[in-house]
Image (cartoon, rainbow, N blue to C red):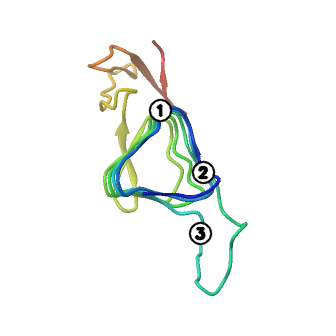
Amino acid sequence: MVISPKVVLGRNVKVQNNVSVYTGVVCEDDVFLGPSCVFTNVVNPRSAVVRRGFYITTRVCKGATIGANATIICGNDIGQYALIGAGSVVTKPVAPYALVVGAPARQVGWVSEFAHKLEFDNHGIAVCPESGQRYRLTDAGVERIS
């Protein structure tokens, strides 16, 4: 495991084995960092070009999950309760509650705060099967309504 200086880890952040988190990463409370996931902090690294002090910040918002072997390219914030699938390569910001997979990562759905895929009815409402929490799909994304 590599946790560089100036990394911010909130309360109850779970860091699994072989994770690499570099300067510039901010993880809010209740974030899960799966085995062997990695964060970059420079967009265009070169061995012969020193870019210390030019690190780009990446924020992982409350409750988000980063799956095993995922790579998060710096500057791409992860929204609250988003779920990044194993092996994904995140090259753009991820919306709250979004489920993204692949390389490059693409959104394939929405998840609840308990990480269940949400199935929306004709009115744009979904219910988490574990918690009973209700969610609404809007033009701006997903919001929890109860």
- Which residue is label 3 attached to? 43
> Furthest residue to the left?
129
The residue lying at 54 percent from left, 50 percent from top is: 93
Label 1 neighbour load within 10 Å: few <14, some 14-19, many 20+: few
Image mark for residue 12: 1
Image height of 59 relative to 44, above or below: above
Secondary structure beneath disc 3?
loop
Mark 2 and mark 1 lie on one chain; the one further toward the N terminus is 2
Residue 12 percent coordinates (x, y): 47, 32
Residue 112 percent coordinates (x, y): 37, 27
Image mark for residue 7: 2
Residue 59 percent coordinates (x, y): 58, 46
Q: Are marks 3 and 2 in contact (CB under 8 Å)?
A: no
Mark 3 and mark 2 lie on one chain; the one further toward the N terminus is 2
Tell us which disc is closer to us: 3 or 2: 2
Secondary structure beneath disc 2?
loop
Q: Amino acid at mark 1?
A: Asn
Image height of 49 relative to 10, above or below: below
The residue lying at 51 percent from left, 45 percent from top is: 78
Image mark for residue 104: none
Image height of 121 relative to 40, above or below: above
Among the 4 quarters of the image, the one containing residue 146: top left
Q: Are marks 2 and 1 in contact (CB under 8 Å)?
A: no
Q: Amino acid at mark 3?
A: Val
